Amino acid sequence: MLVRVFFVFTCILSITDSVPLSEFFPYGSTANDQVFPPNDDGSTNALPLPRIFPYFNNNHRQIYLANNGLFSFLGPISQFVPTPFPLNDGRRVIAGFWSDIDTRGSIPSGNKVYYQIYANQSNTVVFEKAITYVQQYFPGERSFNPSMIITGTWYQVGAYSYQTNLVNTFQIVLVTDEIRSFAFLLYHDLQWASPSTSSLLGVNSSSEIGGQAGFNAGDGIIFEMLPYSRTSNVRRLVNISNVNVPGLFVFRIDSDTIVIGGCGNDSNLLFRPRRGSQLGFTPITIQGPCFTNTSEGDIKCRFSESILVDAIVISEFQAICLTPSVPLPTSINVHLSTDRGITYQLLPNTFTYTSVEYGLSSVDNAQVIILNRTDIIITIGDRLILGWYLSETTMNNWPNNRMRFEIEMWSVTLNESNGGITENSHIVLQTNLMPTLGFQSTSILIPSIDNNDLATVFFRIIARDNLTNTVYAGFNSQLIVLHDTTIDTSGSCQTWAQGQPSPLTWNENLLPCPLTIAQARVARCCYEPDPLCMENSYDSSINCRLRRGRSNHDELSAVACYLSRSTNQWNAGTRCCYGSNGQLITHGTGAGTDNRYRPASSPILHFFSDTLPFLACCLLNSNEEHCTRYFELRPSRRGSNSPNAWGGTWGDPHFTTLDGSAYTFNGYGEYTYLAITDFSTSINTAFNPSTQSFIFNAQIRTAPLSSFNNSATVIRGFAAKSNHSLAQRMSITVSRRDMLIIQRDNETLDLDATTDDTISTNNSLTLFFPEMTLERNQTSGILTLSWFIGVSIQITPISLTDGLVLNIGVSVAGSYRNRTFGLLGLYDNNPNNDLRTPNGTILGLPNTLTLEQIHQQFGQPWAIDPNQSLFYYEMGDSATNYANQNILYIPSFISPEPPASQLNSTLSACNIDPSLTNRSSWTTAQQTCFYDIAVTNDISLGRTSRIAAETVLQISIDQRYPPEFNPDLPLILTVNDSNSITINFTAISPYTSHITYNLIQGPSSASFDEQTALFHWQTSTLNNSETVIRVTAQDSQYQLLSTHELTIRSSSRSIDGGITQPSHGQITSMSSIFIVMNIVMTFYFY
């Protein structure tokens, strides 16, 4: 590995200036500091830290202060002549002035070393000063709220031996929020460079070793040294700086490398935030170059390859650029020019445009919300209250007393050429509104937009400098539909309908809907919650507003809808909606429909092609024929027991295969977890990643936790990649500091809040990529990675006393049966052959094998080739390391037992009845819980393992198939008046032949046989109406219920006066289902 040497960019300033004592962080007796007793070469005992202090990518819980001008972390330092960095003997130090300091001499009020550890933010002076330093000198960082501050102050200290005629005064300040750490070195007065007589007399000596300042990782590789260290000129530190303040140096020190504060150094080139609305006007703060002596137009940003924006210089350390709007969400590169656009420098990382949404913010926090909203549609003449949040960080970047807000309402339309949005005209609703810190709101009256019965609008709040007319920021709302009640929406509906092709031209090969909400909930491979209609929604006032049944129409209202994750070749998708009884709805406005465009893939096209027409034809239109026509063009999809598999890994790794086999494998290494081929395999097909083609490949990393004494391992990483042409590898690993590192290709993803100027309106953040989505639950930290090919991975971080463990749940589409390799087994609905080795050998059922046999014959062979690793590696780590550990590591193969003194607590934690001495009667959840506690002596790990195993069991229950009605049974039956109809509603169950049927809705004159499921009705005149029939089927084994809705419609129903004949309809003879006399029928099959 190459030695990494860093050089601090410094500004040479006045030779007389330095940091005045008044600018030091509070110190001395007035600050209630501890005083280090007078000594020579002494060090404190280990000072316990109330918070974690990250330094050089390691967490520390203790620190030592050395009299000789430094802090150390791994042990005391008494050496008085500094050894040049880098040091490789574990001396992890932060040196302010490492030299032979002697505090035994008498100096009035001086020769003192003070220190203090602050963990209580009640000392506002100290914490606010630290926050100010970070904000000022690291403007590209997200908001910093320190939880601990450590100060060490060397006040008028002399040199060895007892020398007091010349003294040095400096301070080291360390601040952290337990994730990021910063160091501030402040120099007030350096009168001596070393204890030698010549230095004290001010005569330079070539052999003199001056004080040493900087940072050392202790690995013999990484270090940072301040200028003039180890020379007599080290006294000049009081006159130079890396932030243009004489005697002040600031650094970020938590990662593998030291990041220099201030400006003028490539190591701190960055921008923030790294994502924002596609509507634009997000101010990104840029740090890196020194923005001094600049004129208007000197600094420019280039977004992608063509869009140029003039920057606004805030200070010498930062400038901001407003992002332009874009028609479609995307990720782009950002370039910076400091020479009026002659040359550009590529900034690290990309900027991601998040999709504008309709109605609410589900993928990120909101910028502007409507406080008094009661509906998903607004009407002309409504008085709305808009709310937004303004942070102190943002206000500090604005000119004092000159900023004013302007409230605008913008209309948008579909850009037909690219499927995106076009911002059209706007109306100014308010001006000259004074910004206030924190949450702010204002009332607005909604005006009309000329000749538009159903406009799409959003609100934008512009922050403008009244003196220069410069816009500093823009806050955007989500898209909102504006309804003019004086204009009938029928025209919009008819215009849309006339331009629509038959759904048969685009809705083939879409997934059927799960029959029950329980099935949809656990089929994560294939379905995701609809943000506009989801269980436990944060906004009950508008949740499922688009999926409420119409009164007097025999229609049910949805309580939750699910969207298909996959799409077909026409980019279409499916929406499946469920009623309060958990049953699929296929009739009326409460039902889901086929979407011409899948929302997650084409959100703008979906809104204008599916949602807006639904409003125009159904929800805002009293003409029933128009709504009927909408459902003909956007039909509901029937339910089916679509197969999908679930597996996972948790705790001290316990595996459940995709076919449900359970085993334990305590490997230490990186392994093929789930590889899916693009061809069907036989049982004994061997695994050869060099020659076989795979559409998906996932790997896991296992390693011991320090507290387990190498007796057990846990999941510490997951990585995967699909074969999509634009796919990139995804890597989620646990760092040495027990933090999650989430990488896409070589870029670390930022899942924190975009800016301080947002309002938390939901509990999740979602990032969209060409082949997948990444969602994080903001409360639990659960990550869900969903590939559009039908694979979803849920990663649950579990925080234990001694580290972070990853539990993994896997959901796979049923189409991948007979196509999987890896530790999750061969997926073919046969648990007997799950333990298939890479060479194609079937080992047998796990309960017929010992732990050692599973380890050596099945687990270890699935170790990956280091050259095919998908993982990210921290400095000093590599794929080869894990390949070696897989061979060398030998776990315990003996079934563990907890100490007798802990047996009762273990049984209690695992919910095991002490009287059940036969362990074979324990559930899988109880067994894995008991095992993990016995091996690790960690009750919390056992409990989380029990919960994980119970979750897998519940998923297997929710996946059970309710009775499925005959697939030839239609959803809509169009008939002539006055005919006799007999319909067979029989269903089949994989568990039993005994099924109970019930007619829960139908004509009062109809008859229904609950044993044979035959429905009979002598129709009277239908009078152009619809009659809804609902039949349930319930099996006798698990009491699983399914419902079929059938709508009988008169053939005389029309739109625009004609007979409605759907272009995809057909007249079919189906004697096994229908017994009909003198009847003309049109069946709708989906």
Image: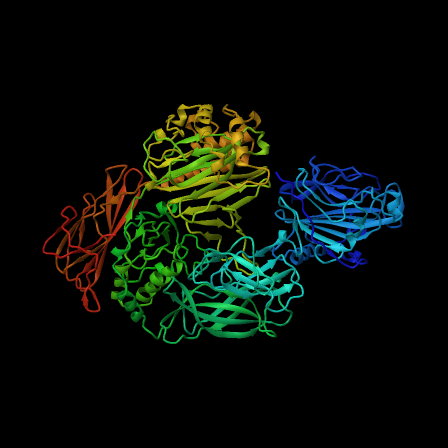
Position of residue 186 relative to residue 996, above or below, is below
Say whether residue 1053 is visible: yes
Name the side, left or right, on which 667 lies relative to 292: left
Who's the residue at 81% across and 38% down the image? 41
Name the side, left or right, on which 218 lies relative to 560: right
Who's the residue at 18% across and 67% down the image? 1058
> Which quarter of the figure is the N terminus placed in?
top right
The percent coordinates of residue 869 (x first, y second) are: 48, 38
The percent coordinates of residue 885 (x first, y second) are: 54, 30
Number of numbered callouts drawn: 0
The percent coordinates of residue 161 (x first, y second) are: 88, 41
* 102 or 121, nearer to the observer: 102
* 676 or 443, nearer to the observer: 676
Name the side, left or right, on which 69 lies relative to 538: right
What colouring style does the render use?
rainbow
Position of residue 358 relative to residue 888, above or below, is below
Extreme-front residue of the structure: 342
Say whether residue 591 is visible: no
* 263 or 843, nearer to the observer: 263
Who's the residue at 31% across and 64% down the image? 618
The percent coordinates of residue 689 (x first, y second) are: 41, 35
* 93 or 224, nearer to the observer: 224
The answer to which image quadrant residue 503 occupies is: bottom left
